[in-house]
Image (cartoon, rainbow, N blue to C red):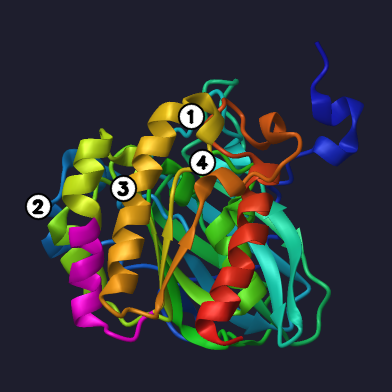
Amino acid sequence: MRRIEDIDPNFRLNGAVPSDYLFCDPREAPFSLWGLAPNDKGLYCRLPLDMLPQCSDGVQELSWHLAGACVRFSTDADGLAVLWTLRGKGNMPHFAATGQSGMELFEETDQGARQVKTVIPQMDNGCGCLKNQAAFAPLPGGMRHYALYLPLYNGLEEFMLGFGPKAKIEAGRKPRLEKPLLFYGSSITQGGCASKVGSCYGTILARRLDAAQVNLGFSGNGKGEENMARYIASIPMSAFILDYDHNAPSAEHLLATHERFYQIVRAAQPDLPIVMVSMPDFDRDPETAAARRAVIVRTYARALEAGDRRVFYVDGQSLFGDTDRDMCTVDGCHPNDLGFLRMADRLEPVLRCALGL
């Protein structure tokens, strides 16, 4: 058999790094990391390390997955080299490696963000990703602002960025909304199964609204625990998207946790916009989905009755739209890029209203 890169050069995985490139640690100035907990230097984790023992085994592991995190910087370089060492293989059969274990580079301006490069991980004979990765991205030159988004469903043990010897590197552009949009929820919230990291609905919304983000989606493990509510309540944010319906084991569990979760966050941040969302894959089991949705609507209605005018609700059944709903997921549950795009389209006007944009 011939390799696909020999048949079509467009599929060639370019891991060649120029020999004169100099490498920088993105945890050091002038680089800035966004979407991670402020742990000790050298650690890439979405939660504080001292919180992990209070969390389920699943949350402890998934906190090292870097959904929503990015590194920002500005440079006039004409190329960027990326070296990274993955924590895991990233070998789920229904989830593209570019979304699980890759990265995505965007140029950021006051007028919006544009994609520059999907940083594609190299595979190990079809069994998963190589542990040690190298990639090269040509850049247009001239001083520009960049954001490099990190893997959705994998972690980093090592991570370095390389530039030509004459390149200037400066601090990156700050988003207009420096206080993040904070998303809490399930595997869908975490980004499964976007084909590339920038296609996760939270990242689409953050780009569109020019906002920082914190993604606290925990695949199969976002269950509305009170310790998570208290932690989220302590974080300064622009808006909170409460989206863990999918991971609550039952409607009864949702009833026991959902309103309490909202109350904890609301008590700490009385003026914070809170957007409640029910599950998008309504069609798989409409009766069960409707029962769960009723719990979330109950929380929303009781908040309104109590005088809360900073709470919003989005019906998950509406998130995939009215046509071609079957084309929005890879497995009837987890959105593909079309599904995530439709979710972002539905949520964007709600967030703009909530934020007064």
**Helix, strand, or loop for circle 4?**
loop
To which residue does mark 2 refer?
53
- Disc 3 from disc 4: Cα separation: 24 Å
Q: Disc number at residue 295? A: 3
| Crowd around label 1: few <14 · some 14–19 · many ≥20 (10 Å) | few
To which residue does mark 1 refer?
286
Q: Quadrant of the C terminus?
A: bottom right
Q: Amino acid at mark 4?
A: Gly
| Crowd around label 4: few <14 · some 14–19 · many ≥20 (10 Å) | many
Please give the range of residues in magenta. Answer: 259-272
N-term-proximal mark, 1 vs 3: 1
Splitting the image into 4 quarters, where does residue 96 fall? top right
Q: Nearer the viewer, residue 17 or 9?
A: 9
Question: Would you say 235 lies left or right of 138 here?
Answer: left
N-term-proximal mark, 3 vs 4: 4
In this rendering, the label closer to the viewer, 1 or 2 = 1
Residue at image position (26%, 69%) is: 232
In this rendering, the label closer to the viewer, 1 or 4 = 1
Question: Would you say 54 lies left or right of 128 here?
Answer: left
In this rendering, the label closer to the viewer, 2 or 3 = 3
Q: Position of residue 187 (x, y in %)?
A: 42, 42
N-term-proximal mark, 1 vs 2: 2
For the residues bearing labels 3 and 4, Cβ distance under 8 angstroms: no
Is residue 265 found inside the magenta-colored segment of the image? yes
N-term-proximal mark, 2 vs 4: 2
| Crowd around label 3: few <14 · some 14–19 · many ≥20 (10 Å) | many
